[in-house]
Image (cartoon, grey):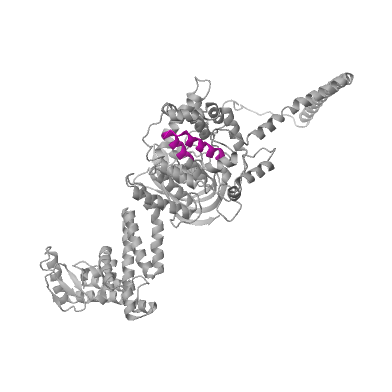
Amino acid sequence: MRIPLDYYRILGLPLAASEEQLRQAYSDRIVQLPRREYSQAAIASRKQFIETAYVVLSNPKERSSYDQLYLSHAYDPDGTATATVTAGKRTEINRDLDNQGLSIEIPQQELVGALLILQELGEYELVLKLGKTYLANHSATSAKIGTNLLEEDFLATSDHPDIVLTVALACLELGREQWQQGYYENAAVSLEAGLEMLSSEGIFASVQAEIQADLYKLRPYRVLELLALPLEKTVQRHQGLELLQSILEDRSGIDGTNNDQSGLSIDDFLRFIQQIRHYLTVAEQHKLFEAESQRPSAVATYLAVYALIARGFAQRQPALIRQARQMLMYLGKRQDVHLEQSLCALLLGQTEEATRVLEMSQEYEALAFIREKSQDSPDLLPGLCLYGEQWLQNEVFPHFRDLSRQPVALKDYFANPQVQAYLEALPTDAETSNEWGVINRQPFASPQSNNQHPQNHSAVNSRQNHGKTPDLNLPEPSNYKVPEYSNSSLPKTNPPPASATANHHQPPEIPVASFTPPERTSSTTSHNLNGKTATSRPPQKRRRRKPPSQPVNREHRLDNNRDRPTRQRRNVTSNLDRKTRLVWTVFASLAGILVFWLIVSTTFGWLKNLFLPDIFLQGEQLSVKLNQPPIEIPHGDSELLPPDGPLTDTTAEEVIRTWLSTKSLALGPNHDIESLTNILTGSSLSQWRLIAQQDRVDNRYRRYDHSVKVEFVSKNDLDPNRAAVLATVKEATQFYENGQKKKSSSESLRVRYDLIRREGTWRIQSMYVVNQISMGF
């Protein structure tokens, strides 16, 4: 066989390499060994190629002859004088005319060594071409049948496994190369080809696991690439949705804790979901997230709500908006979703209900906007309509591929005949309020019991909780953290915490009562599409019976008093006498205390003047006014004005302390990010601003306790406005997330600060940790 190789490439040398470079290259190539899965025969074959190349090039005569062949090939691009060199017979160098270019002729039993060399040189396509051709002509099955060897003996005596391994590794490396270039589907094809080759042979399980691990990590990239294709590519996009579904199954949902081997944490995966939403249509998101919400999943429920609202508004289907409102009713058990509920009621034409629910919202910025736009109106309806249009246009529609450019107009929505017919059939605002109250009184049930006995279990819980006010501020499980993600599509709500299930060993999940699918909603609340409720009547009757009890009691007391008028008058007189005596007693006590205080103070002053007479100062006294300081005191908000000239140790310490206090403000609970501009500049400002913004988005903050000691200050003789400070900083940190303390740490660091003076103020341009002295948790 002829292999397109030359001796210089085998050793990795240029044509003008010296003898010393030749020896060093040979030594390095011999020391480097292929993967441990290769047999000794394959390693020996590779070594023979390296030794042959070294022997030819280290002999001056043979190297001169070989160089002539090499140069003739380089200056003969048409291949009319190409050369062929026999690997095993280095003294026989021929000039045969062929169309193969500069190549080495080898026996077939040495193919595995040549493939190893080509793979090390990155010629993966060539390895696949030669290896697959060989495997097609020399199948392993025929070799086994012909020799009647056991599998272990066959693997030990044949070069077939080594060639299969080389081809599979070429597929692996080619797939990784395509992965880096952004061709994710091509990379998957290459990796799957290598895995199929090894699995069909049943050999090299460790390499199979390595390829499979890469395929798992590649899945999110493939999903993005496939879903980003045009909508006309239905087959490929459907394949992307299937891949996404397989990832969700492996993770047990969007916020699941199972390992899907992709390397993505919960937060990373939530960001990935946010990213792919821009490539999904509203129908695709509706189908995907509604199915995921039944696991149950709090995040999927939120995303399903937004998909239902968007699809219901865009396609003029108010029934979908009503379904979204039902989901929000259950999510309202844990989170403030009154703003979303109000918008749903508005889109369903229930304006009074929308205004009533809006007043319960704690979204102060949105409420301020709505009130501002409703100043000339007796209610909040004008501002709510304007806010609803902007919310749909800016917060909801941009996350759907087919709605991102669609305009929003509430008047067009309400003018649609289909919408008008549906809204006219809906219950009144009063009936809707009763319906919401009944649903909000539904107790939380575990997923298992709700699925098996939905009606009976709900009835039992209703009886157990009869007469009790449901606690809407239930404590959150301490062992579960709700992930949040950047660029959230849920601008007005944060994902609610999921309550723990009955089985503590399972991942935390939100109970079914926080979201019930449409099919189960009807059975649990007896809520029909016409707005009538069956379970709302008994509670209403109980509420009607309770208030009349007070007038009855008052009437009974009046009857008793009417029978005893004389006794009542005596009681009134005695009560007045007791009150009068009490008032006089209080006045007498206060007067006595005042007289006693005057006597004591007078006596004390007389004794003080007797034993401690006043001392009179000699000379002119200072004139100090209480309302005016003797020296000018700078304002508390004024900036520190450092002295001109080189940076001193004292000023350097003040600058670092200012930075540490500013860091506490920017990363603290108030997230005062703008304060960073007062002490930082350049790369350090952009870096810490990004960190602070991310913490604010993720609802995290930190509390610090710092101490600093400046070790030395390095001044710049050429530029007095630049300096470097090395300081030891002890930092104790407490990390909070969603208002709950998560962990704490304490460490001592040696940090270098690069300072620059701008407009008379020293600022930190860059900083980095020199070394870590200690750390504690």
Reply above or below: 672 against 613: below
Please check the rendered image and state whether residue 764 is part of the magenta-colored stretch, yes or no: no
Position of 253 with respect to 569 (left or right) is left
Name the image quarter holding residue 144: bottom left
Q: Is residue 435 above or below residue 78?
A: above
Whether residue 324 is in magenta: the answer is yes
Residue sitting at x 33%, y 62%: 193
Q: Is residue 696 visible?
A: no
Q: Find residue 590 and report its horizontal and vertical position in percent.
A: 80, 24
Quick check: can you spot residue 608?
yes
Give the prevailing secondary structure in the magenta stretch.
helix
From the viewer's perspective, is 94 left or right of 110? left
The percent position of residue 681, horizontal first and vertical second, equals 40, 42
Which residue is located at x 41 percent, y 35 percent?
Answer: 315
**Front-most of 146 and 752?**
146
Can you give x and y, in whole percent of width and height, for residue 610 in the image? 78, 29
What segment is highlighted magenta in the picture? 305-331
Note whether 754 is above or below 215 in the view shown.
Answer: above
Give the camera-side residue of 447 and 626.
447
